[in-house]
Amino acid sequence: MDLRDRVAIVTGGARGIGAAIVRRFVAGGARVVVADVLDEEARTLAAELGDRASSVHLDVTDVDGWRAAVTAAENAYGPVTVLVNNAGIIVWGAIEQVAPEAFRRVLEVNLYGAWLGIRATLPSMRRAGGGCVVNISSTAGLMGYANLGGYVASKWGLRGLTKTAALELARDDIRVCSVHPGPIRTPMVAGLDESTVADQPIPRFGEPDEVARMVEFIVTGATYSTGSEFVVDGGVATGAVPAAEADG
């Protein structure tokens, strides 16, 4: 199986991991809607990629916005067969420091937005005869991180939502999987330096295209996988490097 004639919506698709996924999908022959609140960056990317890509403004927490995005995809290319829920935000701070509205906003974008996306694209995928949903979670959906309560809670929730959706949608020939990136070189980690990753088994930041290649594999190659977790993290979730090795 390949990406030819697939119709995909990629949220948060204007930059970072999302843009890498969009580029790889288009290169593989898919037709892709770049869905983002970063309108100018989304339009620029779509224009660069030609007639197999278009952009749409989408706040993933907006029900009407989702309806409009799916309609735009269907009008331009046909029924949606791939959804990548990649949009996400992060708020740093201890539990007692983060404002309640900030915590809630992280959950709304990272978890509620993905739930809305699955719900909105489901009728289109059914019309297409099946499809694939890929939820971009994080290693924060596999383990805890201090000072990231909202982010960790949202990514664990997205991991659980993936499994529930996989069970509910299997009868429609729709597979649902989650991807768990570690530290990836994107604007989200722009303030972190190389010391952040020095003690990982693979001591470097990952590149967005490394995640995009995994997403492509899930859509085209992992045809017997649903509800599954795919980790792209340099070994972060494996455990700590022994102290002697870490010290050199």
Image: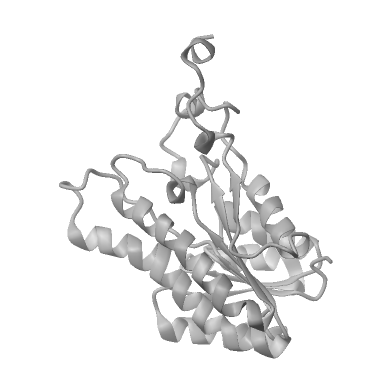
> Residue 135's image quarter?
bottom right
Q: Is residue 92 left or right of residue 139?
A: left
| Relative image position of residue 119 (x, y in whole percent) | 50, 81
Q: Residue at x 63, y 87 (%)?
A: 124
Task: Kindly give the residue lying farthest to the left in the view shown.
Answer: 96
Q: Residue at x 46, y 14 (%)?
A: 243
Q: Is residue 54 left or right of residue 120?
A: right
Q: Residue at x 45, y 40 (%)?
A: 190
Is 153 located above or below residue 69 in the figure? above
Q: Residue 200 versus residue 243: which sits nearer the camera?
A: 243
Q: Quadrant of the N terminus?
A: bottom right
Is 199 located above or below residue 15 in the figure? above
Total numbered labels: 0
Is 212 located above or below residue 79 in the figure? above
| Relative image position of residue 54 (x, y in whole percent) | 65, 74
> Residue 28's image quarter?
bottom right
Q: Quadrant of the C terminus?
A: top right
Is 140 located above or below residue 155 in the figure? above
Q: Residue 150 versus residue 244: which sits nearer the camera?
A: 244
Q: Residue 136 versus residue 14: which sits nearer the camera?
A: 136
| Relative image position of residue 238 (x, y in whole percent) | 53, 34
Q: Residue 38 versus residue 172: which sits nearer the camera?
A: 172
Q: Is residue 213 left or right of residue 134?
A: right
| Relative image position of residue 223 (x, y in whole percent) | 75, 65
